[in-house]
Image (cartoon, rainbow, N blue to C red):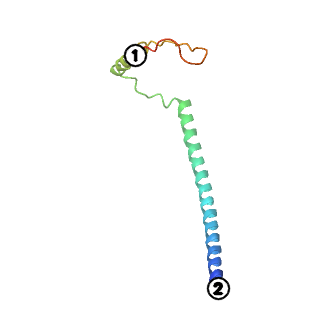
Amino acid sequence: MVDQDTLILASLMLINLLSLGGFAFWIRIHLEQAMLDLDEKLATAIQALVEKLMSGGLAEYEPPNPIQGAIAQLIQGMAEQKMNTFDATVTDRGADGQFTGGTDIE
C-alpha cells in the first residue's frame, strides 16, 4: 500500500514539475514578444522625436513668464545668501589622533 501512495505522489510531483516548466516556457515566449513590441514602439517614438527636432517642430514652446524669472532669481539669491553664512573652522589632531584645541560651538 505504501508503494502505491509513494508512486501516486511521485507522479503528481512529476506532473506538477512538467506543468511548471511548460508555464515558465510559455511566459518566456510572451515576454520575449512583449519586449520586441516594446522595442519597436520605442524605436518609432525616438525616430518621430528626432524628426521633430530636426524639422523644428518642437520650437513652439512658451517663453518663461517674467514673474517666474523674478521668483527664480529670488530663490537663487536666498540660496547664495545661506551658503555664505556658515564659517567652518579646522581643528587639528594631536599625535595620538585626538582632536586638540577647544571644542567651542557657537
Residue 6 horizontal/vertical position (percent): 64, 80
Q: Nearer the viewer, residue 14 or 98?
A: 98
Quarter of the figure with residue 54 = top right
Quarter of the figure with residue 10 = bottom right
**What residue appears at the point 54 percent right and 31 percent down from the top-left corner?**
53
**What residue appears at the point 57 percent right and 39 percent down from the top-left corner?**
46
Residue under circle 2?
4
Q: Nearer the viewer, residue 87 or 22?
A: 87
Quadrant into which the N terminus falls: bottom right
Judging from the image, what secondary structure is the residue with disc 1 in?
A: helix
Q: Is residue 91 left or right of residue 77?
A: right
**What residue appears at the point 62 percent right and 78 percent down from the top-left corner?**
9
Q: CA distance from mark 2 to mark 1?
A: 81 Å
Question: What's the amino acid at mark 2?
Answer: Gln
Judging from the image, what secondary structure is the residue with disc 2 in?
A: helix
Circle count: 2
Residue 69 horizontal/vertical position (percent): 37, 19
Q: Nearer the viewer, residue 3 or 62?
A: 3
Question: What's the amino acid at mark 1?
Answer: Lys
Residue 22 horizontal/vertical position (percent): 63, 67
**Numbered badge on residue 82:** 1
Residue 48 lies, with reference to residue 31, above or below; the image says: above
Taking the view exactly as shown, the residue that stands out farthest to the bottom is 1
Residue 18 lies, with reference to residue 104, above or below; the image says: below
Q: Is residue 60 left or right of residue 19?
A: left
**Numbered badge on residue 63:** none
**What residue appears at the point 56 percent right and 47 percent down from the top-left corner?**
41
Query: Of the residues under marks 2 and 1, which one precedes in the sequence?
Result: 2
Residue 87 lies, with reference to residue 49, above or below; the image says: above
